[in-house]
Amino acid sequence: MFYVFFRGVFRVLFRSVFFLRAEGLENIPAEGAVVLCGNHTSNWDPPLMGSPLKRKVHYMAKAELFDVPVLGYVLPKIAAFPVKRGGVSKESIRLSLQLLKDGEVMGIFPEGTRSNAGGMGKKGAASLALKSGAAVIPAAIIGNYKPFRQMKVVYGPPVDLSEFENSGSEGLEQATDKIMSTIRSMVKQHESK
């Protein structure tokens, strides 16, 4: 209920202030596990990437944010859970895999920090997708969050990672590169429009 309320608030905010347009919604599976991978440009990216969707999107968020008054109360209610930066949190990985096993949607920014698909992707998204069998949906966030200038989020067709199953660490790197190159090409294609 809390999630639905805030999703509605963000939809209104993004449409009225940033004229948000969402494309490719048909590429989001109606059910089943999904790893939604986007480029990272701003702290606004998680609600922007998730608010146009009918499905709930779960996110990892910096553990420090959960110590902030009010924010620490709100974040778990809008499907965010803490992850420690700088190291692999076994608990957050376990929770992510369980969510995907339960057929949920995980929103991930593979770069791990803001760089708009200009940085190297981390292997977490590919690892979760390969371990869970989740569909990998790339998303391109286009625009710079200037009020009354259009923002766009484009959801692409699933990225096929089947060739990297059971291929070890090298395959994981290649899968990550494939996800990132797909996102980069989507960003480039739609920024030029």
Image: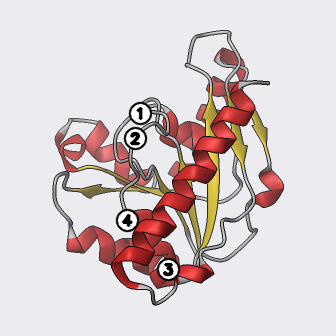
Spatial separation of the CA atoms under disc 4 and disc 3? 10 Å
Q: Is residue 168 above or below residue 99?
A: below
In the image, what residue occupies the spot 64% across and 26% down? 14
Label 2 Cα neighbours within 10 Å, binned few <14 / some 14-19 / many ≥20 = some
Point out residue 15 in the picture as x, y percentages from the top left corner: 71, 25
Mark found first going from the N terminus, 2 or 4: 2
Which one is closest to the eye, mark 3 or mark 2? 2
Query: Are dots 1 and 2 in contact, CB under 8 Å?
Result: yes
Task: Inspect the image, locate mark 3, and give the three-letter code of the amino acid beneath it.
Answer: Leu
Label 1 Cα neighbours within 10 Å, binned few <14 / some 14-19 / many ≥20 = few
The secondary element bearing badge 4 is classed as helix
Spatial separation of the CA atoms under disc 1 and disc 4? 17 Å
Question: Is 82 displayed left or right of 46 in the figure?
Answer: left
Depth order, front residue of 133/159:
159
Query: Are dots 3 and 2 in contact, CB under 8 Å?
Result: no
Point out residue 17 in the picture as x, y percentages from the top left corner: 65, 16
Mark found first going from the N terminus, 4 or 3: 4
Q: Which residue is the site of mark 2? A: 119
Q: Which residue is the site of mark 4? A: 124
